[in-house]
Amino acid sequence: MANRESTFANMVITLMVVAAAASFTLATVYNLTKGPIERSREAARQQAIGMVLPEYDTLVTKKLMPVSGSDSLEFNIGYRDGELVGVAVATYTGMGYSGRIRAMVGFDPEGVIIDVVALDHAETPGLGDKIEKGKSDWSDQFQGFDPREKTLKVRQDQGDVDGITAATITARAYCDAIDRAFQTFMANKENLINKEERN
Amino acid sequence: MGQLQNFTKGFIRDNPVFVLLLGLCPALGVTTSAFNGLGMGLATTFVLVSSNIVVSLIKNFIPSKVRIPCFIVVIASFVTIVELVMEAFMPALFESLGLFIPLIVVNCLVMGRAEAFARKNVAWSALVDGLGMGLGFAFALTLLGGVREIFGAGEIFGLSLFAGDGMLVFVLAPGAFIGLGYLVALNNIVKKKLA
């Protein structure tokens, strides 16, 4: 049961075979799981929109460039009987403790926040993950929050949002994401409400 | 050494966290609650068992000078597979455990068992060893997470035990070290009694 000798040729061939086998396996698994992963992400997105918008019958999705930041935001505009009832904005921030945080923010036509749901993030389990609805009721404070009168910053930064104990960076980042959605919504508000044509 | 002993050694005598002090990064990092500890432990167990079996099967094919890179590729592949499969078919579980999965790659416990056990033993023994060590790891993490959750938040598995905020230090990093220190001491006492 001796190991193969560590000759140069043996080592190169072995590494190549192992790497090729691993790549092949991963590619196969990736292809098998790609569809289901996309479906479950899409379901999570739909569910998040449902949670932050009042009842609607038509949903129009648009990509808009934010006031600050490099990537476009996804605006999901909900109508009922032709009236705009709310806008769900898929927003992001790069200020998180660990990678990008994405969240779905719902606004009523005035700009008051209906609710906020975290879509995905990689914050510290047990501390920063309190932004998730299931982990803590921290994000409930945004329900009915009016960013025109209050400041979307944590209290340490002279704002009106309660921070998360031991995860101030995460709370600060979450406010940044919501503020990005709000600023962009206000900048485009007239266009969104007045536009009659829908596609 | 019988298979039963091979399996049970991971719990007290050779517990990966309390005795071998391996895999401390996830053990200290994610054990803010008992559920987190259990989830991380079970995910690690799966990767450990799979990688142990594969390493044991290919051990004669690998020249010893390049065995470490080969093991790393095998382990990293299994971690990625677990992550993809879990996100695709168990989205609810992925939501609560997804954050921990990539941490398994840097768990030296998996590497340590491949190097110290699997490459010297047949696949069946390696499987039992992986299962025992993995469950021992899960046991240790659940215990540590439970202690921190009870003292830090006054809860266990999310069930409230007493009202109030608890001692925040136990949820933060220092609490992990304090809790681990006492559990290692406790484990030493139990080990002496058993011997």
Image: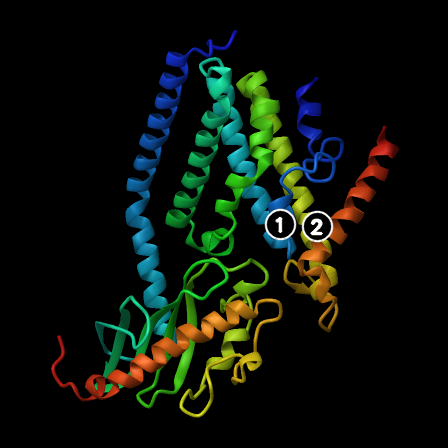
Q: Who's the residue at 49% across and 69% down the image?
A: A133
* Coordinates of residue A186 in the picture (x, y in percent): 30, 85
Numbered disc 2: what chain? B
Q: Is residue B169 left or right of residue A39?
A: right
Nearer the observer, A60 or A192: A192
Identify the element where label 1 is drawn: helix
Q: Classify 10 Å Cα crowding around label 1: few (below 14), some (14-19), many (20 and above).
A: many
Q: Quadrant of the C terminus of chain A?
A: bottom left
Residue B102 x %, y %: 48, 45
Task: Name which residue type carries label 2.
Answer: Leu
**In the structure shown, which secondary structural element does the residue marked by tag 2 occupy?**
helix
Say what amino acid the circle numbered 1 marks: Gly
Q: Pointers 1 and 2 in contact (CB under 8 A)?
A: yes
Instruction: Check chain identity for marks 1 and 2: say if they share one.
Output: yes
> How far across and down, in percent of the image, does residue B57 sit?
48, 18
User: Relative to A55, is B144 on the left or the right?
Assistant: right
